[in-house]
Image (cartoon, coloured by chain):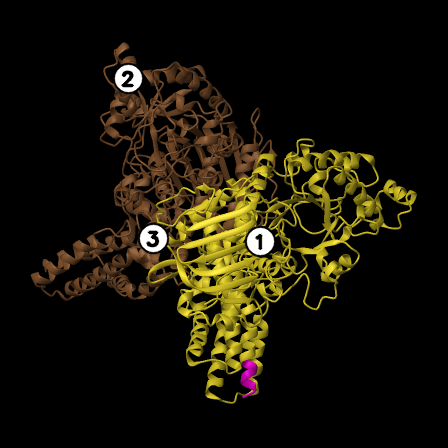
Chain colours: A yellow, B brown
Amino acid sequence: MIIRIKFLAVFVSIFLLVPAKDFGKTGENLLDLMPMPEQVEMREGKCRVTETFSAAIEAVPGAKTLRTARAVRRILDRLAGRTGLFFNNNDIPINNKPIDAALWVSFQRNGEIKLLEDESYQLTIIPGRIELKAVTDIGVIRGLETLLQLLMADDSGYFFPAVVINDRPRFPWRGLLIDPCRHFMPVDVIKRNLDGMAAVKMNVLHWHLSEDQGFRVECKTFPRLHRLGSDGFYYSQEQVRDVIAYAADRGIRVMPEFDIPGHSTGWLVGYPELASLPGPYKIEREYGVKDPTFNPAIKATYKFFKKFFKEMAGLFPDEYVHIGGDENNGIQWDANVKIQAFKKKHHFPDNHALQAYFNREILDILSKFRKKMVGWDEILQPGFPGSIVIQSWRGKEALRGAAKKGYNGILSNGYYIDLVQPTDFHYLNDPIPVDSDLTPGESKKILGGEATMWAELVSPETIDSRIWPRTAAIAERFWSPVYVKDVKDMYRRLDIISLQLEELGLTHLKNQEMMLRRLGNGRDTQALKVLVDVIEPLKIYRRHQSAAYTFFSPLTRVVDAALPDANQARVFRQRVEDFVTGNMDQEAVDVLIRDLRLWESNHQKLKPVIAGAPVLKEIETLSEDLSRVAGIGLEAVAFILAGKKVGPQWVEESKKVLEAAKEPRGHAELMIVTAVERLVDACSKI
Amino acid sequence: MIIRIKFLAVFVSIFLLVPAKDFGKTGENLLDLMPMPEQVEMREGKCRVTETFSAAIEAVPGAKTLRTARAVRRILDRLAGRTGLFFNNNDIPINNKPIDAALWVSFQRNGEIKLLEDESYQLTIIPGRIELKAVTDIGVIRGLETLLQLLMADDSGYFFPAVVINDRPRFPWRGLLIDPCRHFMPVDVIKRNLDGMAAVKMNVLHWHLSEDQGFRVECKTFPRLHRLGSDGFYYSQEQVRDVIAYAADRGIRVMPEFDIPGHSTGWLVGYPELASLPGPYKIEREYGVKDPTFNPAIKATYKFFKKFFKEMAGLFPDEYVHIGGDENNGIQWDANVKIQAFKKKHHFPDNHALQAYFNREILDILSKFRKKMVGWDEILQPGFPGSIVIQSWRGKEALRGAAKKGYNGILSNGYYIDLVQPTDFHYLNDPIPVDSDLTPGESKKILGGEATMWAELVSPETIDSRIWPRTAAIAERFWSPVYVKDVKDMYRRLDIISLQLEELGLTHLKNQEMMLRRLGNGRDTQALKVLVDVIEPLKIYRRHQSAAYTFFSPLTRVVDAALPDANQARVFRQRVEDFVTGNMDQEAVDVLIRDLRLWESNHQKLKPVIAGAPVLKEIETLSEDLSRVAGIGLEAVAFILAGKKVGPQWVEESKKVLEAAKEPRGHAELMIVTAVERLVDACSKI
């Protein structure tokens, strides 16, 4: 029996045709894939994984198989890691024709690590045999990740379900921006996140390498850049090459960003003569938009960038270079009479026009080194060539406008993962919504998007938890067909993928436990965990409004241990919704009550922990409120279950408590309050 | 009131004079220091840590303060991390005379990263002021770690207790061997372990860089060494320099080991012409003593090593180079007629003499580059100069013998942490036991010791849990006075230090939870954790006897998640001891019973988890046995409490179950069986 489907709204019901027992541990009948492939055909049967499992690669005339061999090696290691199996045969032979191996890999040519390279693959699994075919070895790398996500278990052991998958990405540019400037991120942080990206088929690391807070690359031509502008925290050129090779091995481009002419204090510490006002400059310790800006009116600036980009063009093989171009506040330009005279002389009506001039000079330099320019919205100025790429932090409208003018664009608005918004917000944010009025030609200009991990409020210890698992859902948005957007199923799969990402060394889960132990100062952290499970860090820019964070501020408090999109709270909110809409069986009601009781009694348990650790003082009333709010929830549930009319006074008093509980404490907020409010509202309608 | 003490057997009672409430969280009256300083004077009062906390360094005529500034910066960051405080002042001024800073640091000269450098320091804490003085900046680095360990908390916030500490190490050589050959350990693994070493005042990283399983350093003179001998897993010279600088910043020497003439397959893959038998050679995937050995009878060998060590002498600044020299089985030498002829010609009676010849040639080469030779016991052959250092894997007797012959020695026997033995075994193993018959002069020849982290059975994921926290106790053995050896207090402090080590990025605790999640395959891991908490990996070399481990074997099973010296089991064994000796109050008896009940009921909870994860099948009967053994324990406790005579049949049957439960399963063993046996024995004596 073959069930051929394209993913449509009906795909859930079609899957029901496949015997549930075939789909592993939870009895569910959906594959745990993320991103969801374009096309899946389920077949009957299983391909068993035992100690005899082995792999082989087809020899490709004129192509190299080394990258593929390394990728297969990594997959075998991860497969052994998950199954605990000692594979008898660890050679990965390269052969002219299919040989007797459980996994047979073939491709036609080496892929280039380049925009628009073919990443498609076909994966066929039948009992005893897996065939992975692709046009390029990059397609193979994508398909291997799909294969590993298919691993299942039953009473007899591990297996891959029989299936035929035809897959390719919807968008060619699926990026993650990492900012090692606001806080430095050592190479191992970058590498494990590259592994995470590869696991969910992302293909661009956007490496934001210069900022007010630091210049982070060794520059041989202008060594004062990294020597004076980095506190010693920079990537050597060897490290850069190592990261690029590591990324290439995973089919990932590395695009550097050198943010100019603003956001540039880091550069100007070593080269103050290029600034728009006299120095000296010091590495910026605070955050926000700062004044220091390159002087666009002197030749020395362009001479400098010509040499600078010559060196960097040699270091970074990607055809794109990001020049930032955002948030130049113009204060230094306005304050420099020579720059004003220059503006006048060139008839630039405003600083935007002056920046456009600057950008055009930089564009010329980049073109000389065969690089294409990428920049934030601000670089889009009349008269720029169609080869530039606009990265939109402003929004879909800006991107749409650019596309209509013939410019390539990538969307980042809506993917600012540093703002700690819930996964579904990002997931449902589509670079080209279904109701888009773009022509097919204009739509093609929208190359994809990038999640942006700005680093004001993350350290190497916490960054993974701000990237993962939410970015896996964003990766699906960029890879999978537009109609794959079932939020509930996304969250189901996200939980599974999140655990799998840990095997790559990502610390998004395990560092929370460690941070709680440190906060608990030797005491049992269970009660602290119960609280942290239902709070979230303040969203958007509210945390900056709560305190003046600097480079030196500790990122080790409860708010830092709290995770975005708190799972427990989200599940509770859904349960409440089901409960008040009468959509719940007794067992689920019991769970609802059990959770509320746990929270109600939690403050009593947390009190002695707080008493022993002054760092926890700031969340003491938040913890009290959790108990109080849960108590109200319990009362409300009891009223509803009893069908008992409640007095307006109880409602009013409860609402007052709930309103107060919404107040942030310790830069975090309680995520179950609105749900309990819903319960109270439901009471008043009895 | 000043209480001056030297640490003696009486130190517990003397500490009781200090008000208990002054000693932080647990109400205990011992400082949580490890290693324990040579001399501590407690004073009255506290030095508060608030947002105004700041640090300054005395300008030292003719010395550089940069290393100190970086060390103070790291300590301030860790202090902010633990307290959550936003320090207002993050500058660390360098001043001519003491200025108004909470922490005032001074030293006389820059320390050399060299054996026997002065590491002493004096730390004086009074309310409002901390002074840290040392002869060298390395002493400062040691003292800063002591300071951080002193951090405490009370209702008013964080503080350091008033104290005067005079401290210096007992042994000048306090090392940790890391083996990145059997499994490669990326730079971040090395760096976080250097941080861990610094936290407990260790000062030598012994970097075992070549083996049958791989050659791990970039060699420019003989590039086939790393290109063909490493699978691509090697340290570039830039990385080596980076590690050395990182270590030097923490006052740690880096001594390379290039293991020759045996253990050398990794070299011979690229240079088979230097082997004692014709090649070709392949990187060894299995473990144990292998045949491939350098040919000691040809000039080419020494020409090669002359060039090789010339390059490496330039790369590694330490005055010592370790040449291994162990476990040459002589098989290749015996099989090569030319080598036999060479032996005859030189009148070498046996292969030991031939190896002594080889070593002397290597010694000459090293001397040319001003390096001193270190090697395992085997290098000690008549006629070698006193400058060599013997590292003893064979035992204290061998070391004693060497010292008596005038050779310097370091002890590793008894510190083989890869053998997964309990902490107290290592802790009580003293390089110079109190009953030593060595003269003071001979004793001085014993420079210290090294813990050895051989890597057959560890990966980057698990290595930290095999090193830490046990190595902190070994570090105390090497640093603290000989009479500091209270095992109970060591374990008490070890628990605290273990948590602190996590802030350095060490994964010894957090990776266990991650591994359990992976093993649990998405299911709740609580029951699995209960089991894992009372099992240990097979000790000594028994795990290798249970399966043929190779380079590719997964190290992700339950046995790998299990920790050495399982805390819960150890505590239980102590409780049983207290119980049967009548040394226990009712509350403690309740805890004993609670634990036994938890274990008795655990298999029922673990069963569904095992059913969903085939990788757990191997511990199914172990889990059954835990329940069964705990059940017997409960019965025994009930009999004892009731003073009820038990029949011989019950004893016999119980013992049979217990005997069977001692059997290893999944390469792990249950660590509560002997204690339950003790309970059963106690029953039969009622």
Q: Chain of mark 3?
A: B
Residue nearest the viewer, comparing B433 with B104: B433
- Residue annotated with mark 2: B337
- Residue annotated with mark 1: A120
Q: Is residue B266 above or below residue B506?
A: above
Q: Chain of mark 1?
A: A
| Coordinates of residue B199 in the picture (x, y in percent) | 44, 40
Q: Residues within 10 Å of mark 3 (few under 14, many from 20)?
A: many
Q: Secondary structure at mark 3?
A: helix
Q: Which residues are magenta?
A: A680-686
Q: Secondary structure at mark 1?
A: loop
Magenta stretch containing residue A681, yes or no? yes
- Residue B558, label in figure: 3
Of marks 3 and 2, which one's residue comes earlier in the chain? 2
Is B646 displayed left or right of A16 in the figure?
left
Q: Amino acid at mark 1?
A: Ser
Marks 2/1: CA–CA distance: 59 Å
Looking at the rendered structure, the number of numbered marks drawn on it comes to 3
Between tags 1 and 3, which lies in front?
A: 1
